[in-house]
Image (cartoon, rainbow, N blue to C red):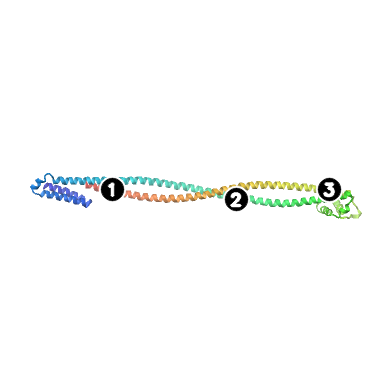
Amino acid sequence: LAQAMLVEVIASRHIEVGSRHTCREAMARRAAVALLLGAACAPAAAESATAAANPIRKVVTMLQNMQKKVMEEGKKEEALFDKYMCYCKTSGGDLAESITTATSKIESVSSEQKAAAETKSQLEADLKDHTSNRDDAKDTMAKATALREKEEAAHAKEKSDLETNLAAIAKAVAALEKGASGSFLQTPSARLVRSWAMEKADLPDQSRQELLAFLSGTQAEGYVPQSGEITGILKQIADEMSQSLSDAIAVEENAIKTYEGLMAAKKKEVAMLQGQIEDKMARVGELGVNLAEMGNDIVDTKEALAADQKFKQELEQGCATKTKEWEEIKKTRAEELL
């Protein structure tokens, strides 16, 4: 009976702790206690018949088996907990590394994006200057060409007039030398010589008057100049015309040379500026694409960073909760094994 009471005390202790276990374990303990009490109250004859199978030993053995099972389950749960903690540590480390990498990448790409934007702005300013300079050079070429055409037309007219007048004077001199001045005075060449003598010839007034009188077929106060005098005046005019023609040709040749030099320089300048414009336009386009790609990269990285930070926070909270739960489980299991 004393033994039965001892077992009952032990069992009641386990039943009290077993309230944290499953109903199956509690029922098993109650069954063991009932079996022990039944054995204690049996007649002495039954006791001697079951001496080979001691009821207390059976209960102790059952309790030991239950203890072993609890310990095995504890080891399994501890192994699962260790795996989960390993996952927390590994995943947390990976997430921390990923967050650090993403943060560094955002700063780096943002810096590159800023530098690329500044370069693009400078290229666009240079492009504007190059375009303006190219247009100025083309405008200078157009104005120089228009002026050259005007100068060329003026020279052509002057040259033609001088050559025509020189031909007329040559005819006049030839007619005077042949004594055929009368017939010459009726020709267009005489009118050309008279017009030149009146408007352009650099002659003394006396010589101009004598020449004009001769060419008009009249002589003042009955004075008739000798043909030699008229011939000398005409030859003087011819010399002046020849010099004027030579000077005009020289001026024209110099103008052509200056124009060609200007055009060559401006064409070279335009070609150089055009090359710079095309190069910088290409670079501006490339930088535009790069800036767009960097912008998209920053947006994507920020989204990935936010997702990693959120997951890391959730993981830390979950791992902390699991650790707290595990501490409670260990405490409860330790109490069960007392």
The image shows residue 157 at horizontal and vertical percentages of 76, 52
Disc on the earlier residue, 2 or 3: 2
Mark 2 to mark 3 CA distance (whole Å): 57 Å
Residue 243 drawn at (x, y percent)? 79, 47
Residue at figure coordinates x 36%, y 50% from the top left: 313
Residue type at mark 3 is Gln
Element on which disc 2 rests:
helix
Horizontally, residue 298 falls left or right of residue 278, namely left
Question: In the image, 235: left or right of 17?
Answer: right
Please give left or right for residue 189 compared with residue 122 in the image. right
| Residue of label 2 | 131
User: Which disc number belongs to residue 236?
Assistant: 3
Q: Position of residue 298 (x, y in %)?
A: 45, 50
**At 24% from the left edge and 47% from the top edge, which residue is drawn?**
333
- Crowd band around label 1 with a 10 angstrom C-alpha radius: few (<14), some (14–19), many (20+): some
Percent across and percent down for residue 324 are 29, 49
Q: Which residue is mark 1?
A: 326
